[in-house]
Image: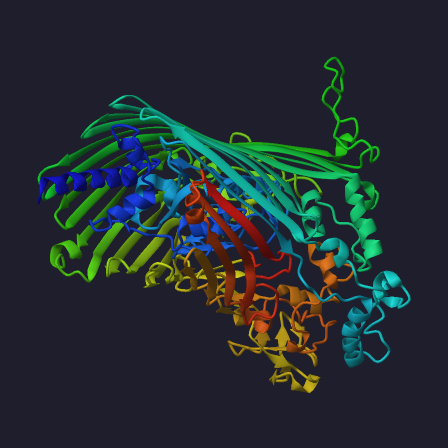
Amino acid sequence: MPKTMHVRWYHKVAIFCYSILFTLSEGSAMTIQDSLAVDSVKASIDTVHRETSAEFTDRAVKTVGSTMKELTVYPAVSLQQSLKGQAPGLYIQETSGEPGSLQQMYVRGVPMPILSAKEIYQSQPLIVLDGIPLIGEHPFAYDIKQYDFNRIGPATNLLTNIDMNNIASVQVLKDMAGMALYGPMAANGVILLTTKQVGSKRKISANAYFGFAQRPNVTTINGEYENAFRQQFYDLYTTTGKYSADDVYPLYLSDSLNMDYYGPSNWTDTYYQNGLQHAITADISGGSDRANFRFSLGNLRNEGIADGTGLDRYSAMFHLNMKPLKWLLFSAMINGNRLDRQRNHNMRDRFAEIGYMPDLQAPLAPNNDVYSQYTSQYDKGFDNNYTNIIQGNAKLVFDFNKFKYTTRLVVDYNEGYRDIFYPRPLLEGNSYASNYYGFNQRLIYDNFASFDWQIDDHQQLFLQAGNVLQWDTYKYNYAYAYKGVNDFIKLNLLNSDPNSDDYLLPTAFPRQLVYKFLDRTKQNLVSFYGKASYKYDAYTLSLLLRTDGSSNAQPTNRWLFTPALSLGWNIKEALLENDLRWSTFNIRLNAGRLGRLNAFDNFSQGPSYTADVTFTGNVTTPGYNAFAVLTRPYNFGWVGYGIPWAYTDQLNLGLDIGLFKDRITASIDGYIKEDKNQLLGIPAYAEYGYNLSYEPGMTVRNTGVDVLLSGEILTKAKQKLGWSSSLNFNFNQNKLKALPRGLDKLIIGNRLLQVGAPVDQYWLFINDGIYAANQDVPQVDGITRTYNGITLQGGDPNWRDLNGDNRINDEDKSLMGNIFPKVVGGFNNQFSYGNWSLGVNFYFNLGRKVVNEEMANRFNFINREGVVGVTSIKEITFWEKRGDYSKYPLYNPWSTVIPYHSNQDLFLENASFLKLRTVSIGYDLSDWLKRRSSKIDHLYIYGTVNNIFTITPYSGRDPELINYTGYDSGYGMAIPLTYTIGLKVDL
């Protein structure tokens, strides 16, 4: 091999190894160069991977289907919105179109049954921004919540702080070849974000867009429509207009002359709106060969289409690199964001927040005059939500050619505030105030040393060792109060006289109606690791060994040792070097183990005790030194001793193919992932006052295939048509392999966990129709079929008796459907003609079922009227026509078997869909400007239309708007149709 080729190859491998092997590193090609020269700083991570694609690597070269240029034209508010449908194996749930609301991500399936919001937090992938592993919210705040609709505090999606205009590349790490370096935090996968590189040449760039989200077209109904809907049941099952003496027709439907309910249903004039959207990001970079910087500022405003929702983001990012000596580099980055969120006013979230249920007999009126008077009451109070986020790192790199040493300090801190005041008219004469302050903080100090040895023209050895010290802290202060002295004093004022006996006691709200909470949890992590990578011609072998110690593990099992092995074979180099048709042909095989962190420090302490002690159901009193308080049962559950680490074992086989100079590329990965030894609450120890015993032993297996295909179908010549296309999808199946204590099945709420079955299936009755008359109900030995001990009659559902005992109960339920889709993917197309470009992006989910609970509630009106509870709340959207009423039999709604309950397949529907997510068109004016000697290097004008249409068999609204339960409650705000125009400019 010629010497010049050898040097070029060596530098590329060094850049590549550094970028992928540095634990929690930035992955910046610039940071390992001998100087900060212009040529070196221009290389981004995408460029490094592309340049080394001809060499073998034990990691996939490409993990995201779209380029950064394509991602930045989409008017995304959050990272999740930017990546949805872009990476095989990454599934994103966008359960609401409300700006700034929480969205979930899952890499290669769910690692555990998602039974509550707490499991969601423990299933999210690690986000790494320029080497900073971002900290998120902690689920411990749900401990004082009666309902988990929302976390206390602002509940703002912290990943709305990611401005994609600052990002140079995105990688989704899904196998042990990439994840193992990040340790236990990476057990759910890693999303690696690398910001734009700092350059020595002065450069000014900007991207700005303006547009609006279109209010939806909905069909409204009023009391006349609702009365006619209910009247068909009265006509069928009553003779006098009453089913029984206790049957009372709702007052709001009884008077047809009441124009509040029987008049115009024009509430949408206040509730829905066209939401304005704009964003601008500008940056400047420059410097010299020894010092350079990049500074960016941005602002985003995204108004929702309903209920006055919206999000404002103010962001700033600063990079600095200095190289005073050839062998010494100082690098620093800081990213700051302010998020102001305007939340919805729906009653469910408000009542769940305040723990108070008023009289719900009369719903909000659909008449806009009346409804606008109601919403104007919010103007007398406030609901302020804002979040401050700051992330930064500083590092020193000592570069002695083959040997490098790096020391680094990382900080990630976010704090959230929510201040609420609801005036008396909203709560039956009771005012309400609350204040929340909480923060999440991560501090990391790590050290890293590597040795890169080019043995000869055929062999290379890369050695690496390091340690990481990590301190995480989560804390909140929270208080709320009822019945203030008036609606003019909107704060929970305290006596400020330190000499008073009432010092720090409330003055504006009664002492006995003020509730205060304070909680903090910590987790410390210590890691040591070493890795050796050896390459011989077309063959690569890498072995990583690490040990991790967590403060949330029990003292007898504080440390966990885990290995990861990856192998690779560059078939192109070994067998097809002279075959010009093949540009890439790699096989990858890796396997390994990673620990899973306990989110709660309770599990590290042995027995602990927590119990509800007041009528609100929110106030909790902990134990002290393992002595229980006098109230029982203990909500948290029994935690025994000897709990081991949970861990994930993964095996991945991958294939990377490129044909005709990579005009056609394919990346295919098959995987088996088992999350073992996980804790699960088992009903036990009721005689001692406990509900649950948390015990290890649950194992969940995910198996599947990731596919990413791309091709240059038409190669653009001068002034001719170009067409590139990419298709990515993931097929995943999960299975419960083991339960604690060797159990075969376990019932938790309305879910059945059964070994050998998927963990995300519904447990439902099979509905075979209706019993038209009493004589149609089957009898055995003269005994009529029953449902949970209630004799079935004419007008009741015909639920299938699976075990043939003529009694319908839980033993007749079946596991069916899947809450999470089996296939998720995206199909992207980019067309170009001359300076014009056109992008079309599709997103699809297949193999998912949804329970249409909103329709079940609509038909179950008898059991929802006059009941004080969350299920009886009727939002203003109650007066919106949704779904197909003709699909359902007319059961007897007064029947005590509750024929329209949602735990039956009557309401189970296919929620697969294909969505045309984005169409973008743009024109590049750069050539035209250059001919005129303009100082503008690049100018690109574009327009987009987003969320254009959805094709689905689901009879409800958008099938995306479903949360982790799989039950469509109708609360998800519609993902809007948006239009934007924008421009990108480089000077």
Residue 351 left/right relative to 132: right
Quadrant holding the N terminus: top left
- Residue 178: x %, y % from top left: 31, 45
Closer-to-camera residue (152/581): 581
Quadrant holding the C terminus: top left
Q: Does 980 sit above or below residue 632?
A: below
Residue at image point 47% right, 61% down: 840
Q: Which residue is most to the front?
A: 932
Q: Which quadrant would residue 766 be assigned to in this image?
A: bottom right
Q: Which residue is most to the right?
A: 257
Closer-to-camera residue (125/353): 125
Q: Does 896 sit above or below residue 270?
A: below
Q: Does 787 sit above or below residue 67?
A: below
Q: Which residue is most to the top?
A: 499
Q: Does 605 sit above or below residue 378?
A: above
Closer-to-camera residue (138/781): 138
Q: Which residue is most to the bottom?
A: 775
Residue at image point 36% right, 51% down: 676
Q: Tell me if residue 547 can be seen.
A: yes
Residue 55 left/right relative to 899: left
Closer-to-camera residue (131/833): 833
Q: Tell me if residue 192 can be seen.
A: no
- Residue 864: x %, y % from top left: 73, 62
- Residue 195: x %, y % from top left: 41, 38
- Residue 647: x %, y % from top left: 35, 46
Q: Which quadrant would residue 884 be assigned to in this image?
A: bottom right
Q: How is the image coloured?
A: rainbow
Residue at image point 86% right, 78% down: 240
